């Protein structure tokens, strides 16, 4: 009798191998977890992720520009100074830590979107402009430095 219990492992009163059943349940739960994470993270691997913002200098003169971005509830902050030559374009990608944060299925708001609006601000010379947008994987804010008929201006648009 003692030999039979040692040989068969741990069994319950009804003869069911409880450790084997527990291992199977854990394996199925782990497999489901990985499948769910794969579905959540797949857009990060297979979608073209647009830049956070792009600055284009369409003027024939060089310009200095300062860009400030403030995220919803302090989620992100950036202040960067640029010296742009005529015709130069600068694109700034979305940080990977934000992409992972936006992909959290337990956060408030839509999946793959920031939790709220970001404030975009650009200043070049004596001209400035502000814009509010909720960033996500496939949108970008475009700042354009233009000179129409001798009047310098900054325009902002969003591309999705």
Image (cartoon, grey):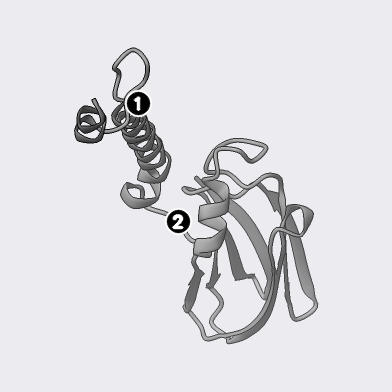
Height in image: 99 above or below 64?
above
The residue sitting at 31% across, 48% down in the picture is 46
Left or right, 14 with respect to 98, comes to: left
Where in the figure is residue 96, as x and y percent of width and height? 49, 62
Write down the residue under mark 2.
50
* Left or right of residue 59, residue 20 in this image: left
At numbered mark 2, what does the secondary structure look like: helix, strand or loop?
loop
Q: Is residue 114 left or right of residue 112?
A: right
Q: Which residue does the numbered mark 1 point to in the structure image?
A: 18
Kind of element beneath mark 1: helix
Q: Is residue 43 above or below residue 141?
A: above
Res. 141 image quadrant: bottom right
Indicate which disc residue 122 carries.
Answer: none
The single residue placed furthest to the top in the displayed view is 14
Give how far apart the Cα atoms at labels 2 and 1 are: 51 Å
Could you tell me which quadrant the N terminus lies in?
Answer: top left
The quadrant where residue 30 appears: top left
Foreground of the two, 153 or 16 = 16
**Residue 96 against residue 110 in the figure, above or below:** below
Which quadrant of the structure image shows residue 14?
top left
- Residue 67: give x, y in percent of width and height: 68, 72
What residue is drawn where x is 48% and y is 49%? Answer: 137
Q: Is residue 94 visible?
A: no
Percent x, y of residue 19: 34, 32
Can residue 145 be seen?
Answer: yes
Tell which circle, 2 or 1, labels the residue nearer the N-terminal end: 1
């Amino acid at each position: 009798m003692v030999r039979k219990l040692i040989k068969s492992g741990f069994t319950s009163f009804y003869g069911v191998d409880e450790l084997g059943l527990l291992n199977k349940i854990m394996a199925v739960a782990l497999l489901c977890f990985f499948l769910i994470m794969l579905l959540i993270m797949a857009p990060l691997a297979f979608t073209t992720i647009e830049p956070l913002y792009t600055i284009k200098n369409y003027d024939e003169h060089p310009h200095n520009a300062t860009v400030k971005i403030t995220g919803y509830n302090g989620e992100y902050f950036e202040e960067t100074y640029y010296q742009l030559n005529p015709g130069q374009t600068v694109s700034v990608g979305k940080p990977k830590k934000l992409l992972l944060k936006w992909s959290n299925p337990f956060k408030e708001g839509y999946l793959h979107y920031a939790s709220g609006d970001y404030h975009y601000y650009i200043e070049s010379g004596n001209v400035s402009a502000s814009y509010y947008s909720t960033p996500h994987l496939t949108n970008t804010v475009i700042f354009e430095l233009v000179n129409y008929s001798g009047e310098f201006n900054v325009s902002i648009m969003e591309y999705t």
